[in-house]
């Protein structure tokens, strides 16, 4: 799927599940629960053991259901590994011109992490089509609203500390989407095999998005 199509799907569904530290053996059941709940974009972080192998597996086996990306990508070398493994988008906690350049070379959507207006403008000027406001939970929805006052050309994703209580606030403040980690997929739920909890969380977040922004529904799936 091309960069434009990934960006469209991000805007339509609004939720990226950040899968950090989830064992490979639990990944299929986890993403199944997410998809049933309406989440269609998942990000495997590169501080997860076997991250490249997990991305490659998901990209091949679930290509008709999920858009699989890579997270915690700090440099161009890691970005290339992720892309060759099948990542269709790349998220970073920080801004790296090298990562943006590598992603542009392969027509992969890059979402650099920024905090300040200076960082946001620098990333946007370097070609980022979406910037990741991080840590959003610390900064709060009003920060995004104020940032977009003078910089309304930016498209922003809220990441870090986004939960069911503040997600709507971030969307109302101007965020087009959010990356959500443990509040959506908790390691405890995975360890307990409680995939129904993950499904319910996914459904809750996607419903919040639809109420605020509109969007599309996921379908039932099996792997």
Image (spheres, rainbow, N blue to C red):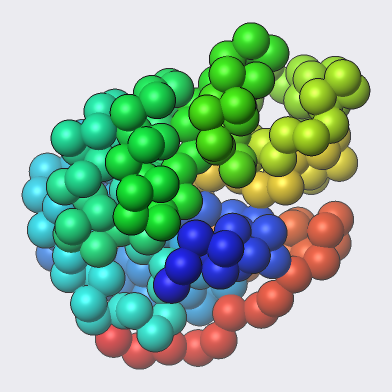
Q: In the rendered image of this protein, does residue 166 appear above or below residue 18?
A: above
- Tell which of 124 and 48 is nearer to you: 124
Quadrant in which residue 168 is drawn: top right
- The picture places residue 169, in percent across and down from the top left corner, at 81, 37
- Tell which of 165 and 119 is nearer to you: 119
- Tell which of 80 and 168 is nearer to you: 80
Q: In the rendered image of this protein, does residue 90 appear above or below residue 127?
A: below
Residue at 35% over, 89% down:
222
Residue at 51% over, 53% down:
16
- The picture places residue 180, in percent across and down from the top left corner, at 52, 44
- The picture places residue 155, in percent across and down from the top left corner, at 71, 40
Q: In the shown orientation, is residue 40 left or right of residue 204? A: left
- The picture places residue 160, in percent across and down from the top left corner, at 53, 29
Please identify the quadrant where the C terminus is shown. Answer: bottom left
Please identify the quadrant where the N terminus is shown. Answer: bottom left
Residue at the far front: name it.
Answer: 105
Residue at 34% over, 79% down:
63
Evaluate whether residue 95 shows in this view: yes
Q: In the shown orientation, is residue 85 left or right of residue 167? A: left
Residue at 79% over, 20% down:
147
Quadrant in which residue 110 is drawn: top left
């Amino acid at each position: 799927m091309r960069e434009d199509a990934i960006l469209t799907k991000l805007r339509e569904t609004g939720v990226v599940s950040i899968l950090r530290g989830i064992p490979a053996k639990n990944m299929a059941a986890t993403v199944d629960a997410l998809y049933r709940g309406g989440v269609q974009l998942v990000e495997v972080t590169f501080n997860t053991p076997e991250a490249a192998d997990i991305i490659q597996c998901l990209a091949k086996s679930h290509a008709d259901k999920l858009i699989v990306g890579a997270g915690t990508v700090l440099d161009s070398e890691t970005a290339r590994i992720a892309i060759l493994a099948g990542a269709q988008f790349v998220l970073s906690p920080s801004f790296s011109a090298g990562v943006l350049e590598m992603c542009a070379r392969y027509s992969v959507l890059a979402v650099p992490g920024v905090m300040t207006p200076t960082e946001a403008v620098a990333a946007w000027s370097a070609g980022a089509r979406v910037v990741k406001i991080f840590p959003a939970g610390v900064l709060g929805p009003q920060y995004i609203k104020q940032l977009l006052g003078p910089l309304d050309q930016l498209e922003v994703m809220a990441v870090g500390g986004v939960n069911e209580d503040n997600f709507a606030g971030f969307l109302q403040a101007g965020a087009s989407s959010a990356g959500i980690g443990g509040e959506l997929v908790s390691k405890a739920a995975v360890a307990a095999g409680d995939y129904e909890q993950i499904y319910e969380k996914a459904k809750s977040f996607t419903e919040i998005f639809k109420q605020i922004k509109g969007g599309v529904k996921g379908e039932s799936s099996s792997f």
